Amino acid sequence: MSGADAVGVGMIGLGTVGGGVAQLLREHAELYAKRCGRRVELRAVVVRNTEKARSSGLIDAALVGNDSTRLQQDDIDVVVEVAGGVDSAYALVADALRAGKHVVTANKALLAAHGPELFGLAREHGASVAFEASCGGGIPCVTGLTFGLMSNAVRGLYGILNGTCNYILTEMTQKGRTYAEALADAKAKGYAEADETLDVSGADAAQKLAVLASLAFGVSVVGDDVSCEGIDNLDLADVRFGAELGYDIKLIAAAECSAEGDGLFLSTRPCFVSADTQLGQVHGADNALSVVGDAVGHVMLYGPGAGRGPTASAVVSDVLNVAAGWYPQAFAAMGLTPDLHAPADKRDSADTVSRFYLRLEVKDVPGNFGRITTTLGEHGISLSAVMQHERKHAGDAFVPVVVTTHACRQGDLRAASAELKRLDAVAGTPVVIRVLDAGG
Amino acid sequence: MSGADAVGVGMIGLGTVGGGVAQLLREHAELYAKRCGRRVELRAVVVRNTEKARSSGLIDAALVGNDSTRLQQDDIDVVVEVAGGVDSAYALVADALRAGKHVVTANKALLAAHGPELFGLAREHGASVAFEASCGGGIPCVTGLTFGLMSNAVRGLYGILNGTCNYILTEMTQKGRTYAEALADAKAKGYAEADETLDVSGADAAQKLAVLASLAFGVSVVGDDVSCEGIDNLDLADVRFGAELGYDIKLIAAAECSAEGDGLFLSTRPCFVSADTQLGQVHGADNALSVVGDAVGHVMLYGPGAGRGPTASAVVSDVLNVAAGWYPQAFAAMGLTPDLHAPADKRDSADTVSRFYLRLEVKDVPGNFGRITTTLGEHGISLSAVMQHERKHAGDAFVPVVVTTHACRQGDLRAASAELKRLDAVAGTPVVIRVLDAGG
């Protein structure tokens, strides 16, 4: 922090979020001065097109084209990165940190790829990196998880961290739309990018989970550590059967301790959650993070996961916490970030113990139902619910049989499922979806 | 903070919460040393009965009877107050602050009565007061609201802040119990005190709201500023009619800006919330805090509102944040606490604009229904839903008529309600319950 009275902010990017940040800093200048004890001034913005940016009328600060050295000058204390992307953001952020500037970033892809390196660079140069906006949009999940729940040995994180997926799944559940229909609608409404791959594959949620799991478990996790199953192969039939059983389908990013506490299960996959739980009530583009801690039990943080206002809320809160001086001290004193930690000891998902939903297409002849339940029983899997409807059309050779299991090892279920697939009585590949109970 | 490597903690009280604090500090000593960069050691505990406390086997620290000067010695950096009560807690906490010790307290009654004075005393002596556990048990609502949502001009707080009330209301809603039956059950299960008055009158929730509203709106609010309506007069009939309309009844502690932003409405009262919203899904003894901010929109924090583990989670998180050094800096630098603020400019609840539920007992003769809707219309109140069932028994002279209104001034509804009461067609006093839409 410079010795001057006011705190100087430089920003990289003036898109949707950057515009929101500029607007908040202008509109709430007096409020923020009161809250941090110092004025917070936006002094320079690096943009691709200075003409276009100037015509926005959003800011009085200097607009800089390619010359990012402006952000390294003495009158800049904090650099806000809201440009997105990985490579160019990396170069600009690293330069700012080397110049001793504190960095506030909303960029989970950057942190998932280069987090430990950037955190280390900050330490080396007496700076800090704040990143509340990188996960869960406007929800104060980083602050809540680190400082608010600091006393807990965390047992599990269960997040709805991708608004695009949650919007699509909500449309499928509530309006009976197919995946393709719901995706088209999400694109039309601006909830999904032209190329939806990063969102629907689960990769975006995995990047956010990597950031949160690093903090919660005191290990170094990168996005690639998370096993990813997207929502793009989801069949509307399963969404409907789940609903009949009282479940809503959600893309859940989960980080869980093994029972022995010596390893992490990291996954992003569609899961069924009870419709009448907190996670089950997260609809549309909203996000949520459930935290299960050994002392606190189950806590959930809920709110808007993206958008101009919510993301700017998180970015500017970080800026104010840096400006007040406490965040840099917390960053330096507390061993929270993954640069200080060993890589996570990942556990094989076969050892995950959970309830599951299983759908089989079964030949409708006597004895087949018994053959299936016997096979499951032989693998130590006991059933919680069973559902078989009458055939829709007299000519149907196969009918869907849906079962939910009591808690079992995922590896055992996989083995049972592989054996069921080989039966003549069963057509195609059984569908397996995890059932998540409240609070994990 | 003393210059020593380890941080010394003194504690007042070793009851349910104190025992939990001692246990966490012992079990997680290594984890905490890693997270704060310093060991955190419980060194002295002030208890009423040292013999009883020693036999608990919970702690190795010195046990002190009446001699609270032990907490003012050099090897104590942080004093934890978990004894409860107001007067004796006040004296002990004030002495600790005068000795320059940081204080962590779970005592909302103490803060509601003496908050500004104690915060001021801390500033004067270079100390700080942390109080996450005073509101919402294990939910990180103070941390989330202040640091995580720092950038927002808050428009409204809507909290379910009393687990006893929420337990009773959940029993009434889900099991059709009367208030008296549900209260007896809550006492039998330990969710309600022998004297339930503080909880069911709304006074406890009002104290917590005072703490949170002070932070959110940058004003000084005390418990008495909050208009209180308890749950003890609630009729099961209204709970049932509400359920038919899709609403759950909750005791909501609300702090809301006037539309002009120049005053606060502060109330604790039973409200209907849609059953399929986040607040509607807060059942049993759980708590939640909805925050509506100008930038972020609607965020909710949910979790256990009381109990040994959750409360100890919040207390120890505060201790660690103080031990790491950042919290005292934030306390000193940021103008967040009510000792720095003017008293709240309270607004008359007549100006609250909201939707309402109204139940009238109406004489079942032609024309009466029209008379009622006409009276409401004359006061500018338009109806959202109307419900009148057939009489249960042929001899019933009066039948209940339930209406929900579109948004209207509460003062207008009161005037209409008083006029309706004077009609021959209406028996008794109309029942008015606020209907709270999602996110306020």
Image (cartoon, coloured by chain):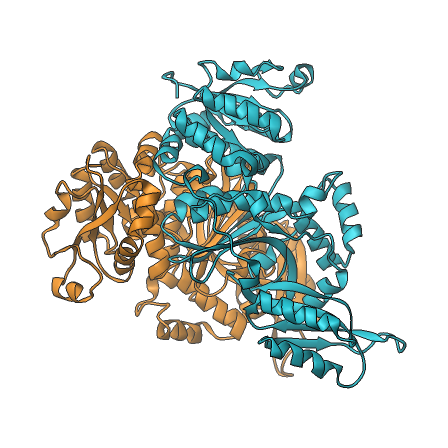
Chain colours: A cyan, B orange
- Choose top left, top right, bottom left or bottom right for residue B376: bottom right
In-image side of A357 versus B339 (left or right): right
**Is B227 in front, or is A311?**
A311
Counting from the top left corner in percent of width and height, residue B304 is at 42, 59
Residue B121 can be seen in this image: yes
Which residue corresponds to the image point at 32% horizontal and 41% vertical from the top-left?
B36
Extreme residue in the right direction: A395
**Is B384 in front, or is A6?**
A6
Counting from the top left corner in percent of width and height, residue A100 is at 43, 21
Extreme residue in the bottom direction: A366
Which residue corresponds to the image point at 46% horizontal and 36% vertical from the top-left?
B150
Counting from the top left corner in percent of width and height, residue B306 is at 37, 59
Q: Quadrant of the N terminus of chain A?
A: top left
In-image side of A270 versus B185 (left or right): right
Up-down relation of residue B79 to residue A369 (above or below): above
Which residue corresponds to the image point at 67% horizontal and 49% vertical from the top-left?
A165
Label total for image: 0
- Choose top left, top right, bottom left or bottom right for residue A386: bottom right
Counting from the top left corner in percent of width and height, residue B80 is at 24, 49
